[in-house]
Image (tube, helix red, strand yellow):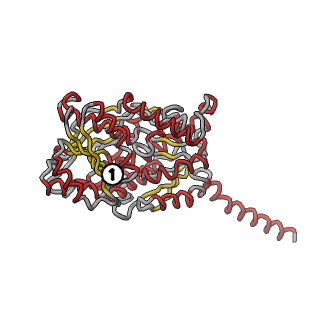
Amino acid sequence: MKRTFATLSAAVAALASIASAPAAAQEKQQYFPMLTFRTGPYAPSGTPWANGFVDYYKLVNLNGGINGVKVLWEECETGYATDRGVECYERLKDKHGGATVFQTMSTGITFALTERGAADKIPILTPAYGVSESADGEAYKWSFPIGGTHWASADTQFQYLAQRAGGMDKLKGKKVTLLYHDSPYGKESIPVLTARAKANGVELATLPVSHPGVDQKAAWLQIRQSRPDYVLLWGWGVMNSTALKEAQSTGYARNKMIGVWPSGSESDVKGISGADGYSAVLLLPGPGASSKIAKEVLEKLHAKGNGSGPKEEVGEALYMRGLMNAMMSVEGVRRAQEKFGKGKVMSPVQARWGYENLNIDQKRLEELGIADIMRPIVTTCKDHMGPSSAKAYTWDGSKWNASSDWLQADPNVIKPLLKDAVDRHLAEKKQTRRSAEDCNS
């Protein structure tokens, strides 16, 4: 009996060991939920963006993880709808030991999740989009529009407009029409463009386009009647290609149209007759088919049948944005490990510190293989955005060509708007700015 009992005890112990193995492995996985939109009218924009995310995470794991910690990701389809984005957040936030960070991939979803993320102590990462005033980290502790906001997009777009006109002094008296997606994303452009127009004597008209953007007849009738000198396009998905088609049908010159990064992807212009000459100002990054990281994706993933989409999209603007967004999420965790333990799984609170203390310098960008289309990123407690750089690209009928040097969002334009918005936010929420002690925590 003793021998039988000992054998049974050993078997039970072995089974317990096997049962605990997944839990032990789970402890070495960093969980990144993804709110993606591969279906619906915005799928042509959302799909390459999501593929870039996934391929970057695959590369991280192929290269040993984050100092040995493997990346675990899970997609949840939102269709770019705010209510579905909130449902996905609630469904995923506590899975696999808890979400490290959420990237909403939608300004509307960002608005809906900003306070939820803060209450749950989960960072909300929105590189180059989101709630523009969340750049102030002393007021928005859990929000990170790293590398830029829609306000930065609007300012750099206006700077490029001035370059096209021959200088800021040449804009006085010009008529400019803003054609924008009637959503939180499109509306974010208005404060900056209004301020810039007023300061430079520009007559600015604003024309909203309802979701999803296929019905623009009335807007283009107004454009044909008012005959603006330039049209600034803030579209998304099918709205962009529709705008270019309507411009051609009404005889409006495409070289007088300037978009921003959500209106500057290959899916917006490919196959569109007459899109030649259209330009878009892209916050980090732009298209990068020759980037080292794009070549690495082709060699390590697509060459082995493990790419997340068609290999032809690797290097395109939205695909590269997905790579960059995923890179930001990983680099924040890597930075947090420097403080809280290299090779350890970081909690959302620890990861938040990493996103708030990023220092992705030129050397690191070169190591990451994305230095040709990125600029260094530094964040602090006060500044959750960091420097915001953009570059203009012009479509020649087959590819995007750089048509400007690096453009930097002007703090003299952004800061007054930021202060006013943050002051209102703090007053409405009856909150105060973070203390120095909290910044160091």
Q: Quadrant of residue 273?
A: bottom left
Q: Is residue 92 above or below residue 172?
A: below
For the residue labelled by badge 1, is the local secondary structure a helix, a strand or a loop? helix
Query: Is the residue marked by circle 1 packed among few (<14), some (14-19), or many (20+) residues within 10 Å?
Result: many
State the quadrant of the C terminus: top right
Which one is nearer the viewer's eye here, 54 or 187? 187
Residue at (46%, 54%) from the top-left corner? 109
Q: List the single residue furthest toward the right.
A: 1
Task: Give whichever of 354, 122 is nearer the camera.
Answer: 122
Q: Is residue 344 left or right of residue 250?
A: right
Q: Quadrant of residue 123 in the image? A: top right
Left or right: where 117 falls relative to 9: left
Q: Where is residue 57 drawn, in percent x and y?
A: 45, 51
- Disc 1 designates what residue? 298
Q: Can residue 345 be spotted in the picture?
A: no
Q: How far from the left and from the top, in percent, is residue 60?
A: 46, 48
Please, what is the three-letter code of the amino acid marked with disc 1?
Answer: Leu
Report the side of 352 relative to 402 (left or right): right
Name the spot of residue 42 as percent of width and height, x first: 34, 59
Q: In terms of depth relative to the viewer, which is nearer, 238 or 36?
A: 238
Name the image quarter holding the N terminus.
bottom right
Residue at (16, 51) in percent of width and height: 224
Tell me if residue 270 can be seen. yes
Residue 383 located left or right of residue 196: right
Image coordinates for residue 100, horizontal then vertical, percent? 56, 48
* Count of numbered circles in the view: 1
Q: Looking at this view, is 435 or 332 the one in front?
A: 435
* Residue 285 higher or lower than 107, as above or below: above
Relative to 64, say whether 161 is above or below. above
Q: What residue is rendered at 47% in x and 50% in y?
A: 110
